Image: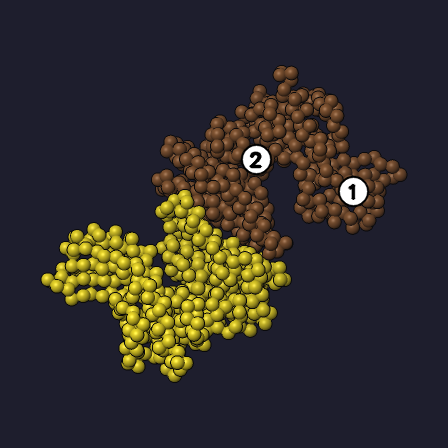
Chain colours: A brown, B yellow
Amino acid sequence: MALIVQKFGGSSVKDAERLFNVADIVTSKYREGNDVVVVVSAQGDTTDDLIEKAKEINKNPSKREMDQLLTAGEQISASLLAMAIEQLGYPVVSLLGWQAGFTTSTAYGSARIKRVNPERIRAELSRRNIVVVTGFQGVNKYDDMTTLGRGGSDTSAVAIAAAMHADLCQIYTDVDGVYTADPRKIPAAQKLDVISYDEMLELATLGAQVLNNRSVEMAKKYHIELEVLSSLTRAKGTIVKEVTNVEKMLISGVAKDDNIARISIIGVPDKPGLAFRIFSKLAQKNINVDIILQSIGRNGTKDISFTVERDKMDTASELLESYVEMIGASSVVYDDNVAKVSIVGSGMESHPGVASDMFEALFEANVNIQMIATSEIKISVLIDKEDANKAVAAIHAKFFEQVMQ
Amino acid sequence: MALIVQKFGGSSVKDAERLFNVADIVTSKYREGNDVVVVVSAQGDTTDDLIEKAKEINKNPSKREMDQLLTAGEQISASLLAMAIEQLGYPVVSLLGWQAGFTTSTAYGSARIKRVNPERIRAELSRRNIVVVTGFQGVNKYDDMTTLGRGGSDTSAVAIAAAMHADLCQIYTDVDGVYTADPRKIPAAQKLDVISYDEMLELATLGAQVLNNRSVEMAKKYHIELEVLSSLTRAKGTIVKEVTNVEKMLISGVAKDDNIARISIIGVPDKPGLAFRIFSKLAQKNINVDIILQSIGRNGTKDISFTVERDKMDTASELLESYVEMIGASSVVYDDNVAKVSIVGSGMESHPGVASDMFEALFEANVNIQMIATSEIKISVLIDKEDANKAVAAIHAKFFEQVMQ
């Protein structure tokens, strides 16, 4: 008998048929004698529908009321899933974030889990109930509802798994595992049996969108083995865990992120501290900066370029327009017609030549590179958005399909 | 400066336009310097839609999960109303039942409010926030969500008014007050300026559907003056309060209830205790019995007839079918093609002849009376459903329109 945490995303619970499919997966684990805790997201487009309803009334509602509104989404899906499990004849109870013991920070809309007190979940399990928990939400010290931000249900699942020392945490989604590239775009993409936390982290932040990165960080910290798998195919998925040296793959995947924008500040005076001041300004507004490139420039000035999430571009530009004048730079230039393509692989640390293979693939595909950034296990390039799919295909072919050529 | 509790029903908050209308009513009271607590129902058909979603999955879901599901409805309307108030530029906070301090009994689906701890509401008011509270819901001793049953939002509003000693409790609905009859059916129906708690109670239980009867009972108990008014016309409504003798009207209204069924148990042996056993059986299943008529019968047996809510007829009949045999009665007969028509008026206590006037009106309209029941301030008759509107018109004309004839 084991304790299993299973998380199902919005598309896995989007209608009655899918809910019964999930109920079947859950109860089959329960029948084997396991304790089962299920974490669910809101159904299908519920969250987007609620956001739209809110925007119809108030273009800029307070984040507190937004959270009060959005938490209803998982409440609905969790209770409906419980009813489906009841219908199959199994004992079940659904719990909201606050009932399940989720205490979070006060940051409405992007709260962090501070603590999971699993007392109630334990009590329900000891009564042999299947426990369905609303993902994505908790309650803060003011007794206000909070949400963890998009993808937060993964984090909810891992947090429960960590708090309860679960034996396995399965993340059911609409893909059946982690691939070497997006299988919808690259038919030759291969499913990975195993991937390390670090590789998964790089892929998550790079727009591969399989797992929320906070959930992977948490899984890594608490040594929770994750399995990413599909609620539809029910095939074996991809295990995310600490990978030993022997298992390390040279490259585990190619990812594309075209939800970004490039901002360049032109003619920044060459004085110390200015870059720091620019980026701390952005950080204060919660704008994450990714690839940064600083040119040598001319006439005692330099250009600083960086990327931000596309929907942060307007906020960032407003902020910088006024600031640029103050620090004596000449102008700010924006471009959201860009994409970032990256390769990730924990094996590249010990294998030089990976970068040059990647650049060669791009050169052969006639893709121009605007910016380059590297970490120990990742190489990213910024290119024109229209080249993105071509670039991913060329890089994937170079690293994964050479045997077939 | 006063403390005002305002309650808005589902049709008053059904879409963005109506929400802004409500926000305007609320903020106009706030601008006058009042503390304002607003109680809202779920938007329009939300509750029915959620019930339908549930039934698609499970025809007979547990009441606990039903409550977990349904409480999302007011959560959505309360946060959206808060956003509309924010949009108008006023400070506001929405609170769920449990956040607002509503503790209820454990009876899922029809919980009773045990206590309202208004600490959080008070704290928010002292920050000059408008407070929006979800009606219809609370939390029980297991920390589970509960609902108060249909119409429970009225009770929520009165409970807050009672707990906080509010100066006024306004119940906004889609009619602009209490009428002498349903104004959609009887064009000559007149709006009442004032009605007593007792009259309102009789009207509420009689299908006039203006106010939930539990809310009126609670208002009576705690001496909360209610005003029933329309969120659309904004005209002065009807005040519900303790009425002195001078103000007492002979008849305050005529009401119809066709959401009932008649059940007759034929040939009950004439032994003491059988009637008690039948009705306690029904009470155990939470089936309320209204008009009861016991015939003298023949051959040492009697017939017992009574009315129940129409949607309880199947449960009641199942229960009785088996029981009837056990107690030696011969059969059970059902009829849901009936309606109850009643007149209510606290003045009739001291005026004999009201009943005979009513029966005369029915006789002149050629309406056959099946059963009669009377209380101190009410006379009800059970008639064929198809005669119901004709009967109401005839009675209303007799008592309210004679001057015009």
**In this orientation, does residue A115 appear?**
no
Residue drawn at (69%, 31%) of the image: A388
Residue drawn at (75%, 25%) of the image: A366
**In this orientation, does residue B317 appear?**
yes
Dividing the image into 4 quarters, which one contains the N terminus of chain B? bottom right
Dividing the image into 4 quarters, which one contains the C terminus of chain B? bottom left
Q: Kindly indicate whether the residues beneath marks 2 and 1 are on one polypeptide chain.
A: yes
Q: Answer with the quarter of the image where residue A200 lies.
A: top right
Q: Name the residue under label 1.
A: A333
Residue drawn at (85%, 40%) of the image: A301
Q: How far apart are marks 2 and 1 (CA)?
A: 33 Å
Above-or-below relation of B297 to A347: below
Task: Name the amino acid type tagged 1.
Answer: Val
Residue drawn at (44%, 36%) of the image: A21
- Residue B91 relative to residue B136: left or right: right
Q: Earlier in the sequence, mark 2 or mark 1?
A: 2
Q: Name the spot of residue B85 as percent of width and height, x first.
A: 59, 61
User: In the orientation shown, which residue stands out farthest toward the left?
Assistant: B299
User: In the orientation shown, which residue stands out farthest toward the right?
Assistant: A299
- Residue A46 relative to residue B138: left or right: right
